[in-house]
Image (spheres, rainbow, N blue to C red):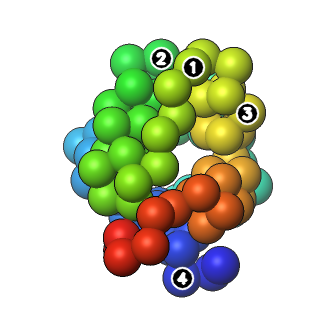
Amino acid sequence: MEVLREELKSKIVKTLDLMDAKEEDIGNDDQLIGGELGLDSIDVLELAIMIEKDYGVLIDNKELGQKVFRTVTTLAEYVQQHRTKGCA
């Protein structure tokens, strides 16, 4: 799970082109949406697309997105439970 969390942090920084943040700046349990990173609904949409492409995991509604993108830990748990076999 730790490897997946670190991988997701890296992908968050790269996908959203966060110039002021580094992977190590993102805590596993830091609030993602509306937290210090300042992620908004557009950012969540970009991340949802990346999650589907890279892991085969679909996050297809706002309520689920708010739950899944709460923290890196909640995101990693959801991805691990729902990823398709053969994806990263």
**The disc label shown at residue 41, or none:** 2
Classify mark 1: residues with Cα within 10 Å, few (<14), some (14-19) or many (20+). Answer: few
Residue assigned mark 3: 67
Q: Which of marks 3 and 1 precedes in the sequence?
A: 1
Q: Which of marks 2 and 3 precedes in the sequence?
A: 2
Q: Residue at coordinates 48% horizontally, 17% vertically from top-left?
A: 41
Q: Assign the C terminus to one quadrant of the image.
A: bottom left
Residue type at mark 2: give it. Answer: Ser
Q: State the CA–CA distance, disc 4 to disc 1.
A: 27 Å
Is mark 4 in CB contact (under 8 Å) with mark 1? Answer: no
x and y percentages locating residue 26 in the rendered image: 56, 57
Q: Secondary structure at mark 3?
A: helix
Residue assigned mark 1: 61
Q: Is residue 47 left or right of residue 26?
A: left
Q: Assign the N terminus to one quadrant of the image.
A: bottom right
Which mark is in front, 4 or 1?
1
Residue assigned mark 4: 3
Residue type at mark 3: give it. Answer: Lys
